[in-house]
């Protein structure tokens, strides 16, 4: 039996749930030896490329037992019809292989890359008086209640030492993440390369924090004053002001040319452009769940979106939606704390799908390499995107 027929037999067994451990290892080893040549999957293997991908994805999610979103995973190329099903298969088996069979595997293309770990609990806390603390990586969350302390109760700041209304800044570097619980019980998840400014206590109305850069996911508690009136919550950025009721939403300000992207998963917010220059577009919109606002130099655009993709990072996934190699590598650069340079001027390849964020850089790149992307690590932190072989 030739290798292609054997691969088809093992793939069918995987889909049917009848594959044994030895065969699973054989299929995984065969996948790991795969380089850049495509292998066509006959039309008889599934009625369509989408059926194939959906079938394999269902099996991967069942076996890996992770809360993976249900959308199909695909790569788009100029010759998409010829290779899409093959690439989708390898992407999905790759996820399963790296999360189940050999999470610490070293491939011939990624011996050094596998030493680069994903982001961890790294952050700095800077107080108004200039004091700065590098936060404990064994901790994952700060609790703010006048005092500033870790989740286990270890205090970093006593409210009796300073004015309780003083502000502090929580910042994550490249390769860092952290969580924050504010004094009103509201929660913030801070992505890599992000900063937020907040008070040690909220005194009076309104409650205000400032997202200085990057990306954060917010879960805001409703609060009312003694007379029963609501106490508003504001998230301020340099381009916009978000007014919040009790709600959940994500703000992404990474890419200046794309604007500030606010996506609501639950509840209601209003988004106002602070320096609205265009009179042809509204400078304030009201967003409900599933709605998104993009604020840029021209004004505010409002869209209906699938929120899963825009909050996937909080659930532990990279999400790409027809993104080019530069957008993909920008995400990887922040998450893995690397610098990326390019030997290629550009690429027509577009990437869509989910990749787990808890794999090493080598594992993540191996999945992209199956799509034909070529990489070289030229120093500890310098990754070069090369021409396709």
Image: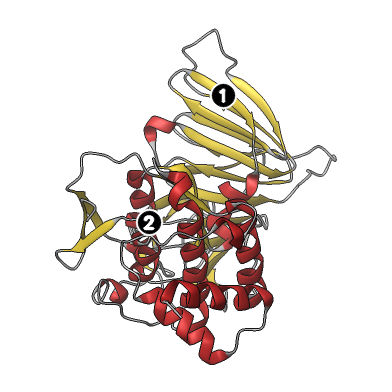
Q: Position of residue 336 (x, y in %)?
A: 34, 63
Q: Is residue 369 above or below residue 109?
A: above
As drawn, the label of residue 301 is: 1
Most extreme residue toward the left is 378
For the C terminus, the quadrant is bottom left
Horizontally, residue 23 falls left or right of residue 36, namely right
As drawn, the label of residue 319 is: none
Q: Position of residue 348 (x, y in %)?
A: 34, 39
Q: Is residue 99 above or below residue 272?
A: below
Front one among 267 and 156: 267
- Dividing the picture into quadrants, the one containing residue 264 is top right
Q: Position of residue 258 (x, y in %)?
A: 43, 32
- Dividing the picture into quadrants, the one containing residue 192 is bottom left
- Determine whether the residue tagged by mark 1 lies in a helix, strand or loop: strand
The mark nearer the N terminus, 2 or 1, is 1
For marks 2 and 1, give the CA distance: 33 Å
Q: Position of residue 51 (x, y in %)?
A: 65, 55
Asked whether the residues under the numbered discs 2 and 1 touch, taking CB atoms below 8 Å apart as contact, a structural biologist would say no
Q: Residue under circle 2?
A: 371
Label 2, residues with CA under 10 Å away: few <14, some 14-19, many ≥20? many
Select label 2 or label 1 by which is in front.
2
């Amino acid at each position: 039996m030739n290798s292609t027929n054997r691969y088809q037999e093992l793939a069918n067994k995987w889909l049917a749930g009848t594959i044994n451990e030895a065969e699973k290892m054989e299929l995984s080893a065969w996948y790991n030896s795969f380089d850049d040549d495509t292998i066509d999957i006959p039309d008889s293997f599934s009625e369509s490329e989408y059926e194939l991908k959906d079938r394999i994805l269902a099996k991967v999610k069942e076996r890996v037992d992770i809360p993976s979103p249900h959308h199909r995973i695909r790569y788009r190329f100029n010759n998409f019809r010829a290779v899409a099903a093959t690439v989708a298969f390898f992407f999905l088996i790759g996820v399963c292989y790296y999360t189940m069979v050999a999470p610490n595997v070293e491939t011939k293309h990624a011996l050094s890359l596998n030493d680069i770990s994903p982001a961890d609990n790294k952050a700095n806390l800077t107080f108004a008086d200039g004091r700065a603390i590098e936060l404990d990586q064994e901790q994952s969350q700060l609790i703010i209640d006048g005092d500033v302390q870790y989740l286990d109760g270890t205090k970093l700041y006593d409210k009796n030492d300073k004015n309780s209304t003083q502000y502090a800044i929580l910042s994550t570097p490249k390769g860092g993440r952290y969580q924050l619980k504010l004094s009103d019980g509201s929660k913030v998840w801070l992505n890599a390369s992000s900063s937020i400014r907040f008070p040690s206590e909220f005194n009076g109305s309104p409650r205000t924090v400032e997202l200085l850069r990057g990306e954060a996911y917010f879960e805001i508690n409703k609060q009312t004053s003694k007379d029963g009136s609501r106490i508003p919550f504001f998230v301020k950025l340099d381009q916009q002001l978000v007014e919040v009721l009790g709600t959940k939403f994500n703000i992404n300000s990474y890419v200046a040319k794309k604007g500030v992207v606010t996506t609501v998963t639950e509840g209601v917010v209003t988004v106002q452009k602070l320096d609205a220059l265009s009179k042809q577009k509204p400078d304030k919109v009201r967003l409900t769940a599933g709605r998104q606002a993009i604020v840029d130099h021209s004004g505010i655009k409002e869209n209906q979106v699938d929120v899963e993709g825009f909050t996937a990072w909080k659930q532990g996934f990279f999400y790409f939606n027809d993104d080019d190699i530069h957008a993909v590598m920008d995400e990887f650069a922040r998450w893995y704390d690397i610098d990326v340079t390019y030997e290629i001027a550009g690429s027509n390849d577009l990437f869509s799908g989910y990749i787990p964020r808890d794999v090493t850089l080598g594992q993540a790149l191996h999945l992209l390499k199956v799509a034909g992307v070529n990489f070289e690590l030229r120093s500890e932190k310098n990754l070069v995107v090369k021409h396709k072989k």
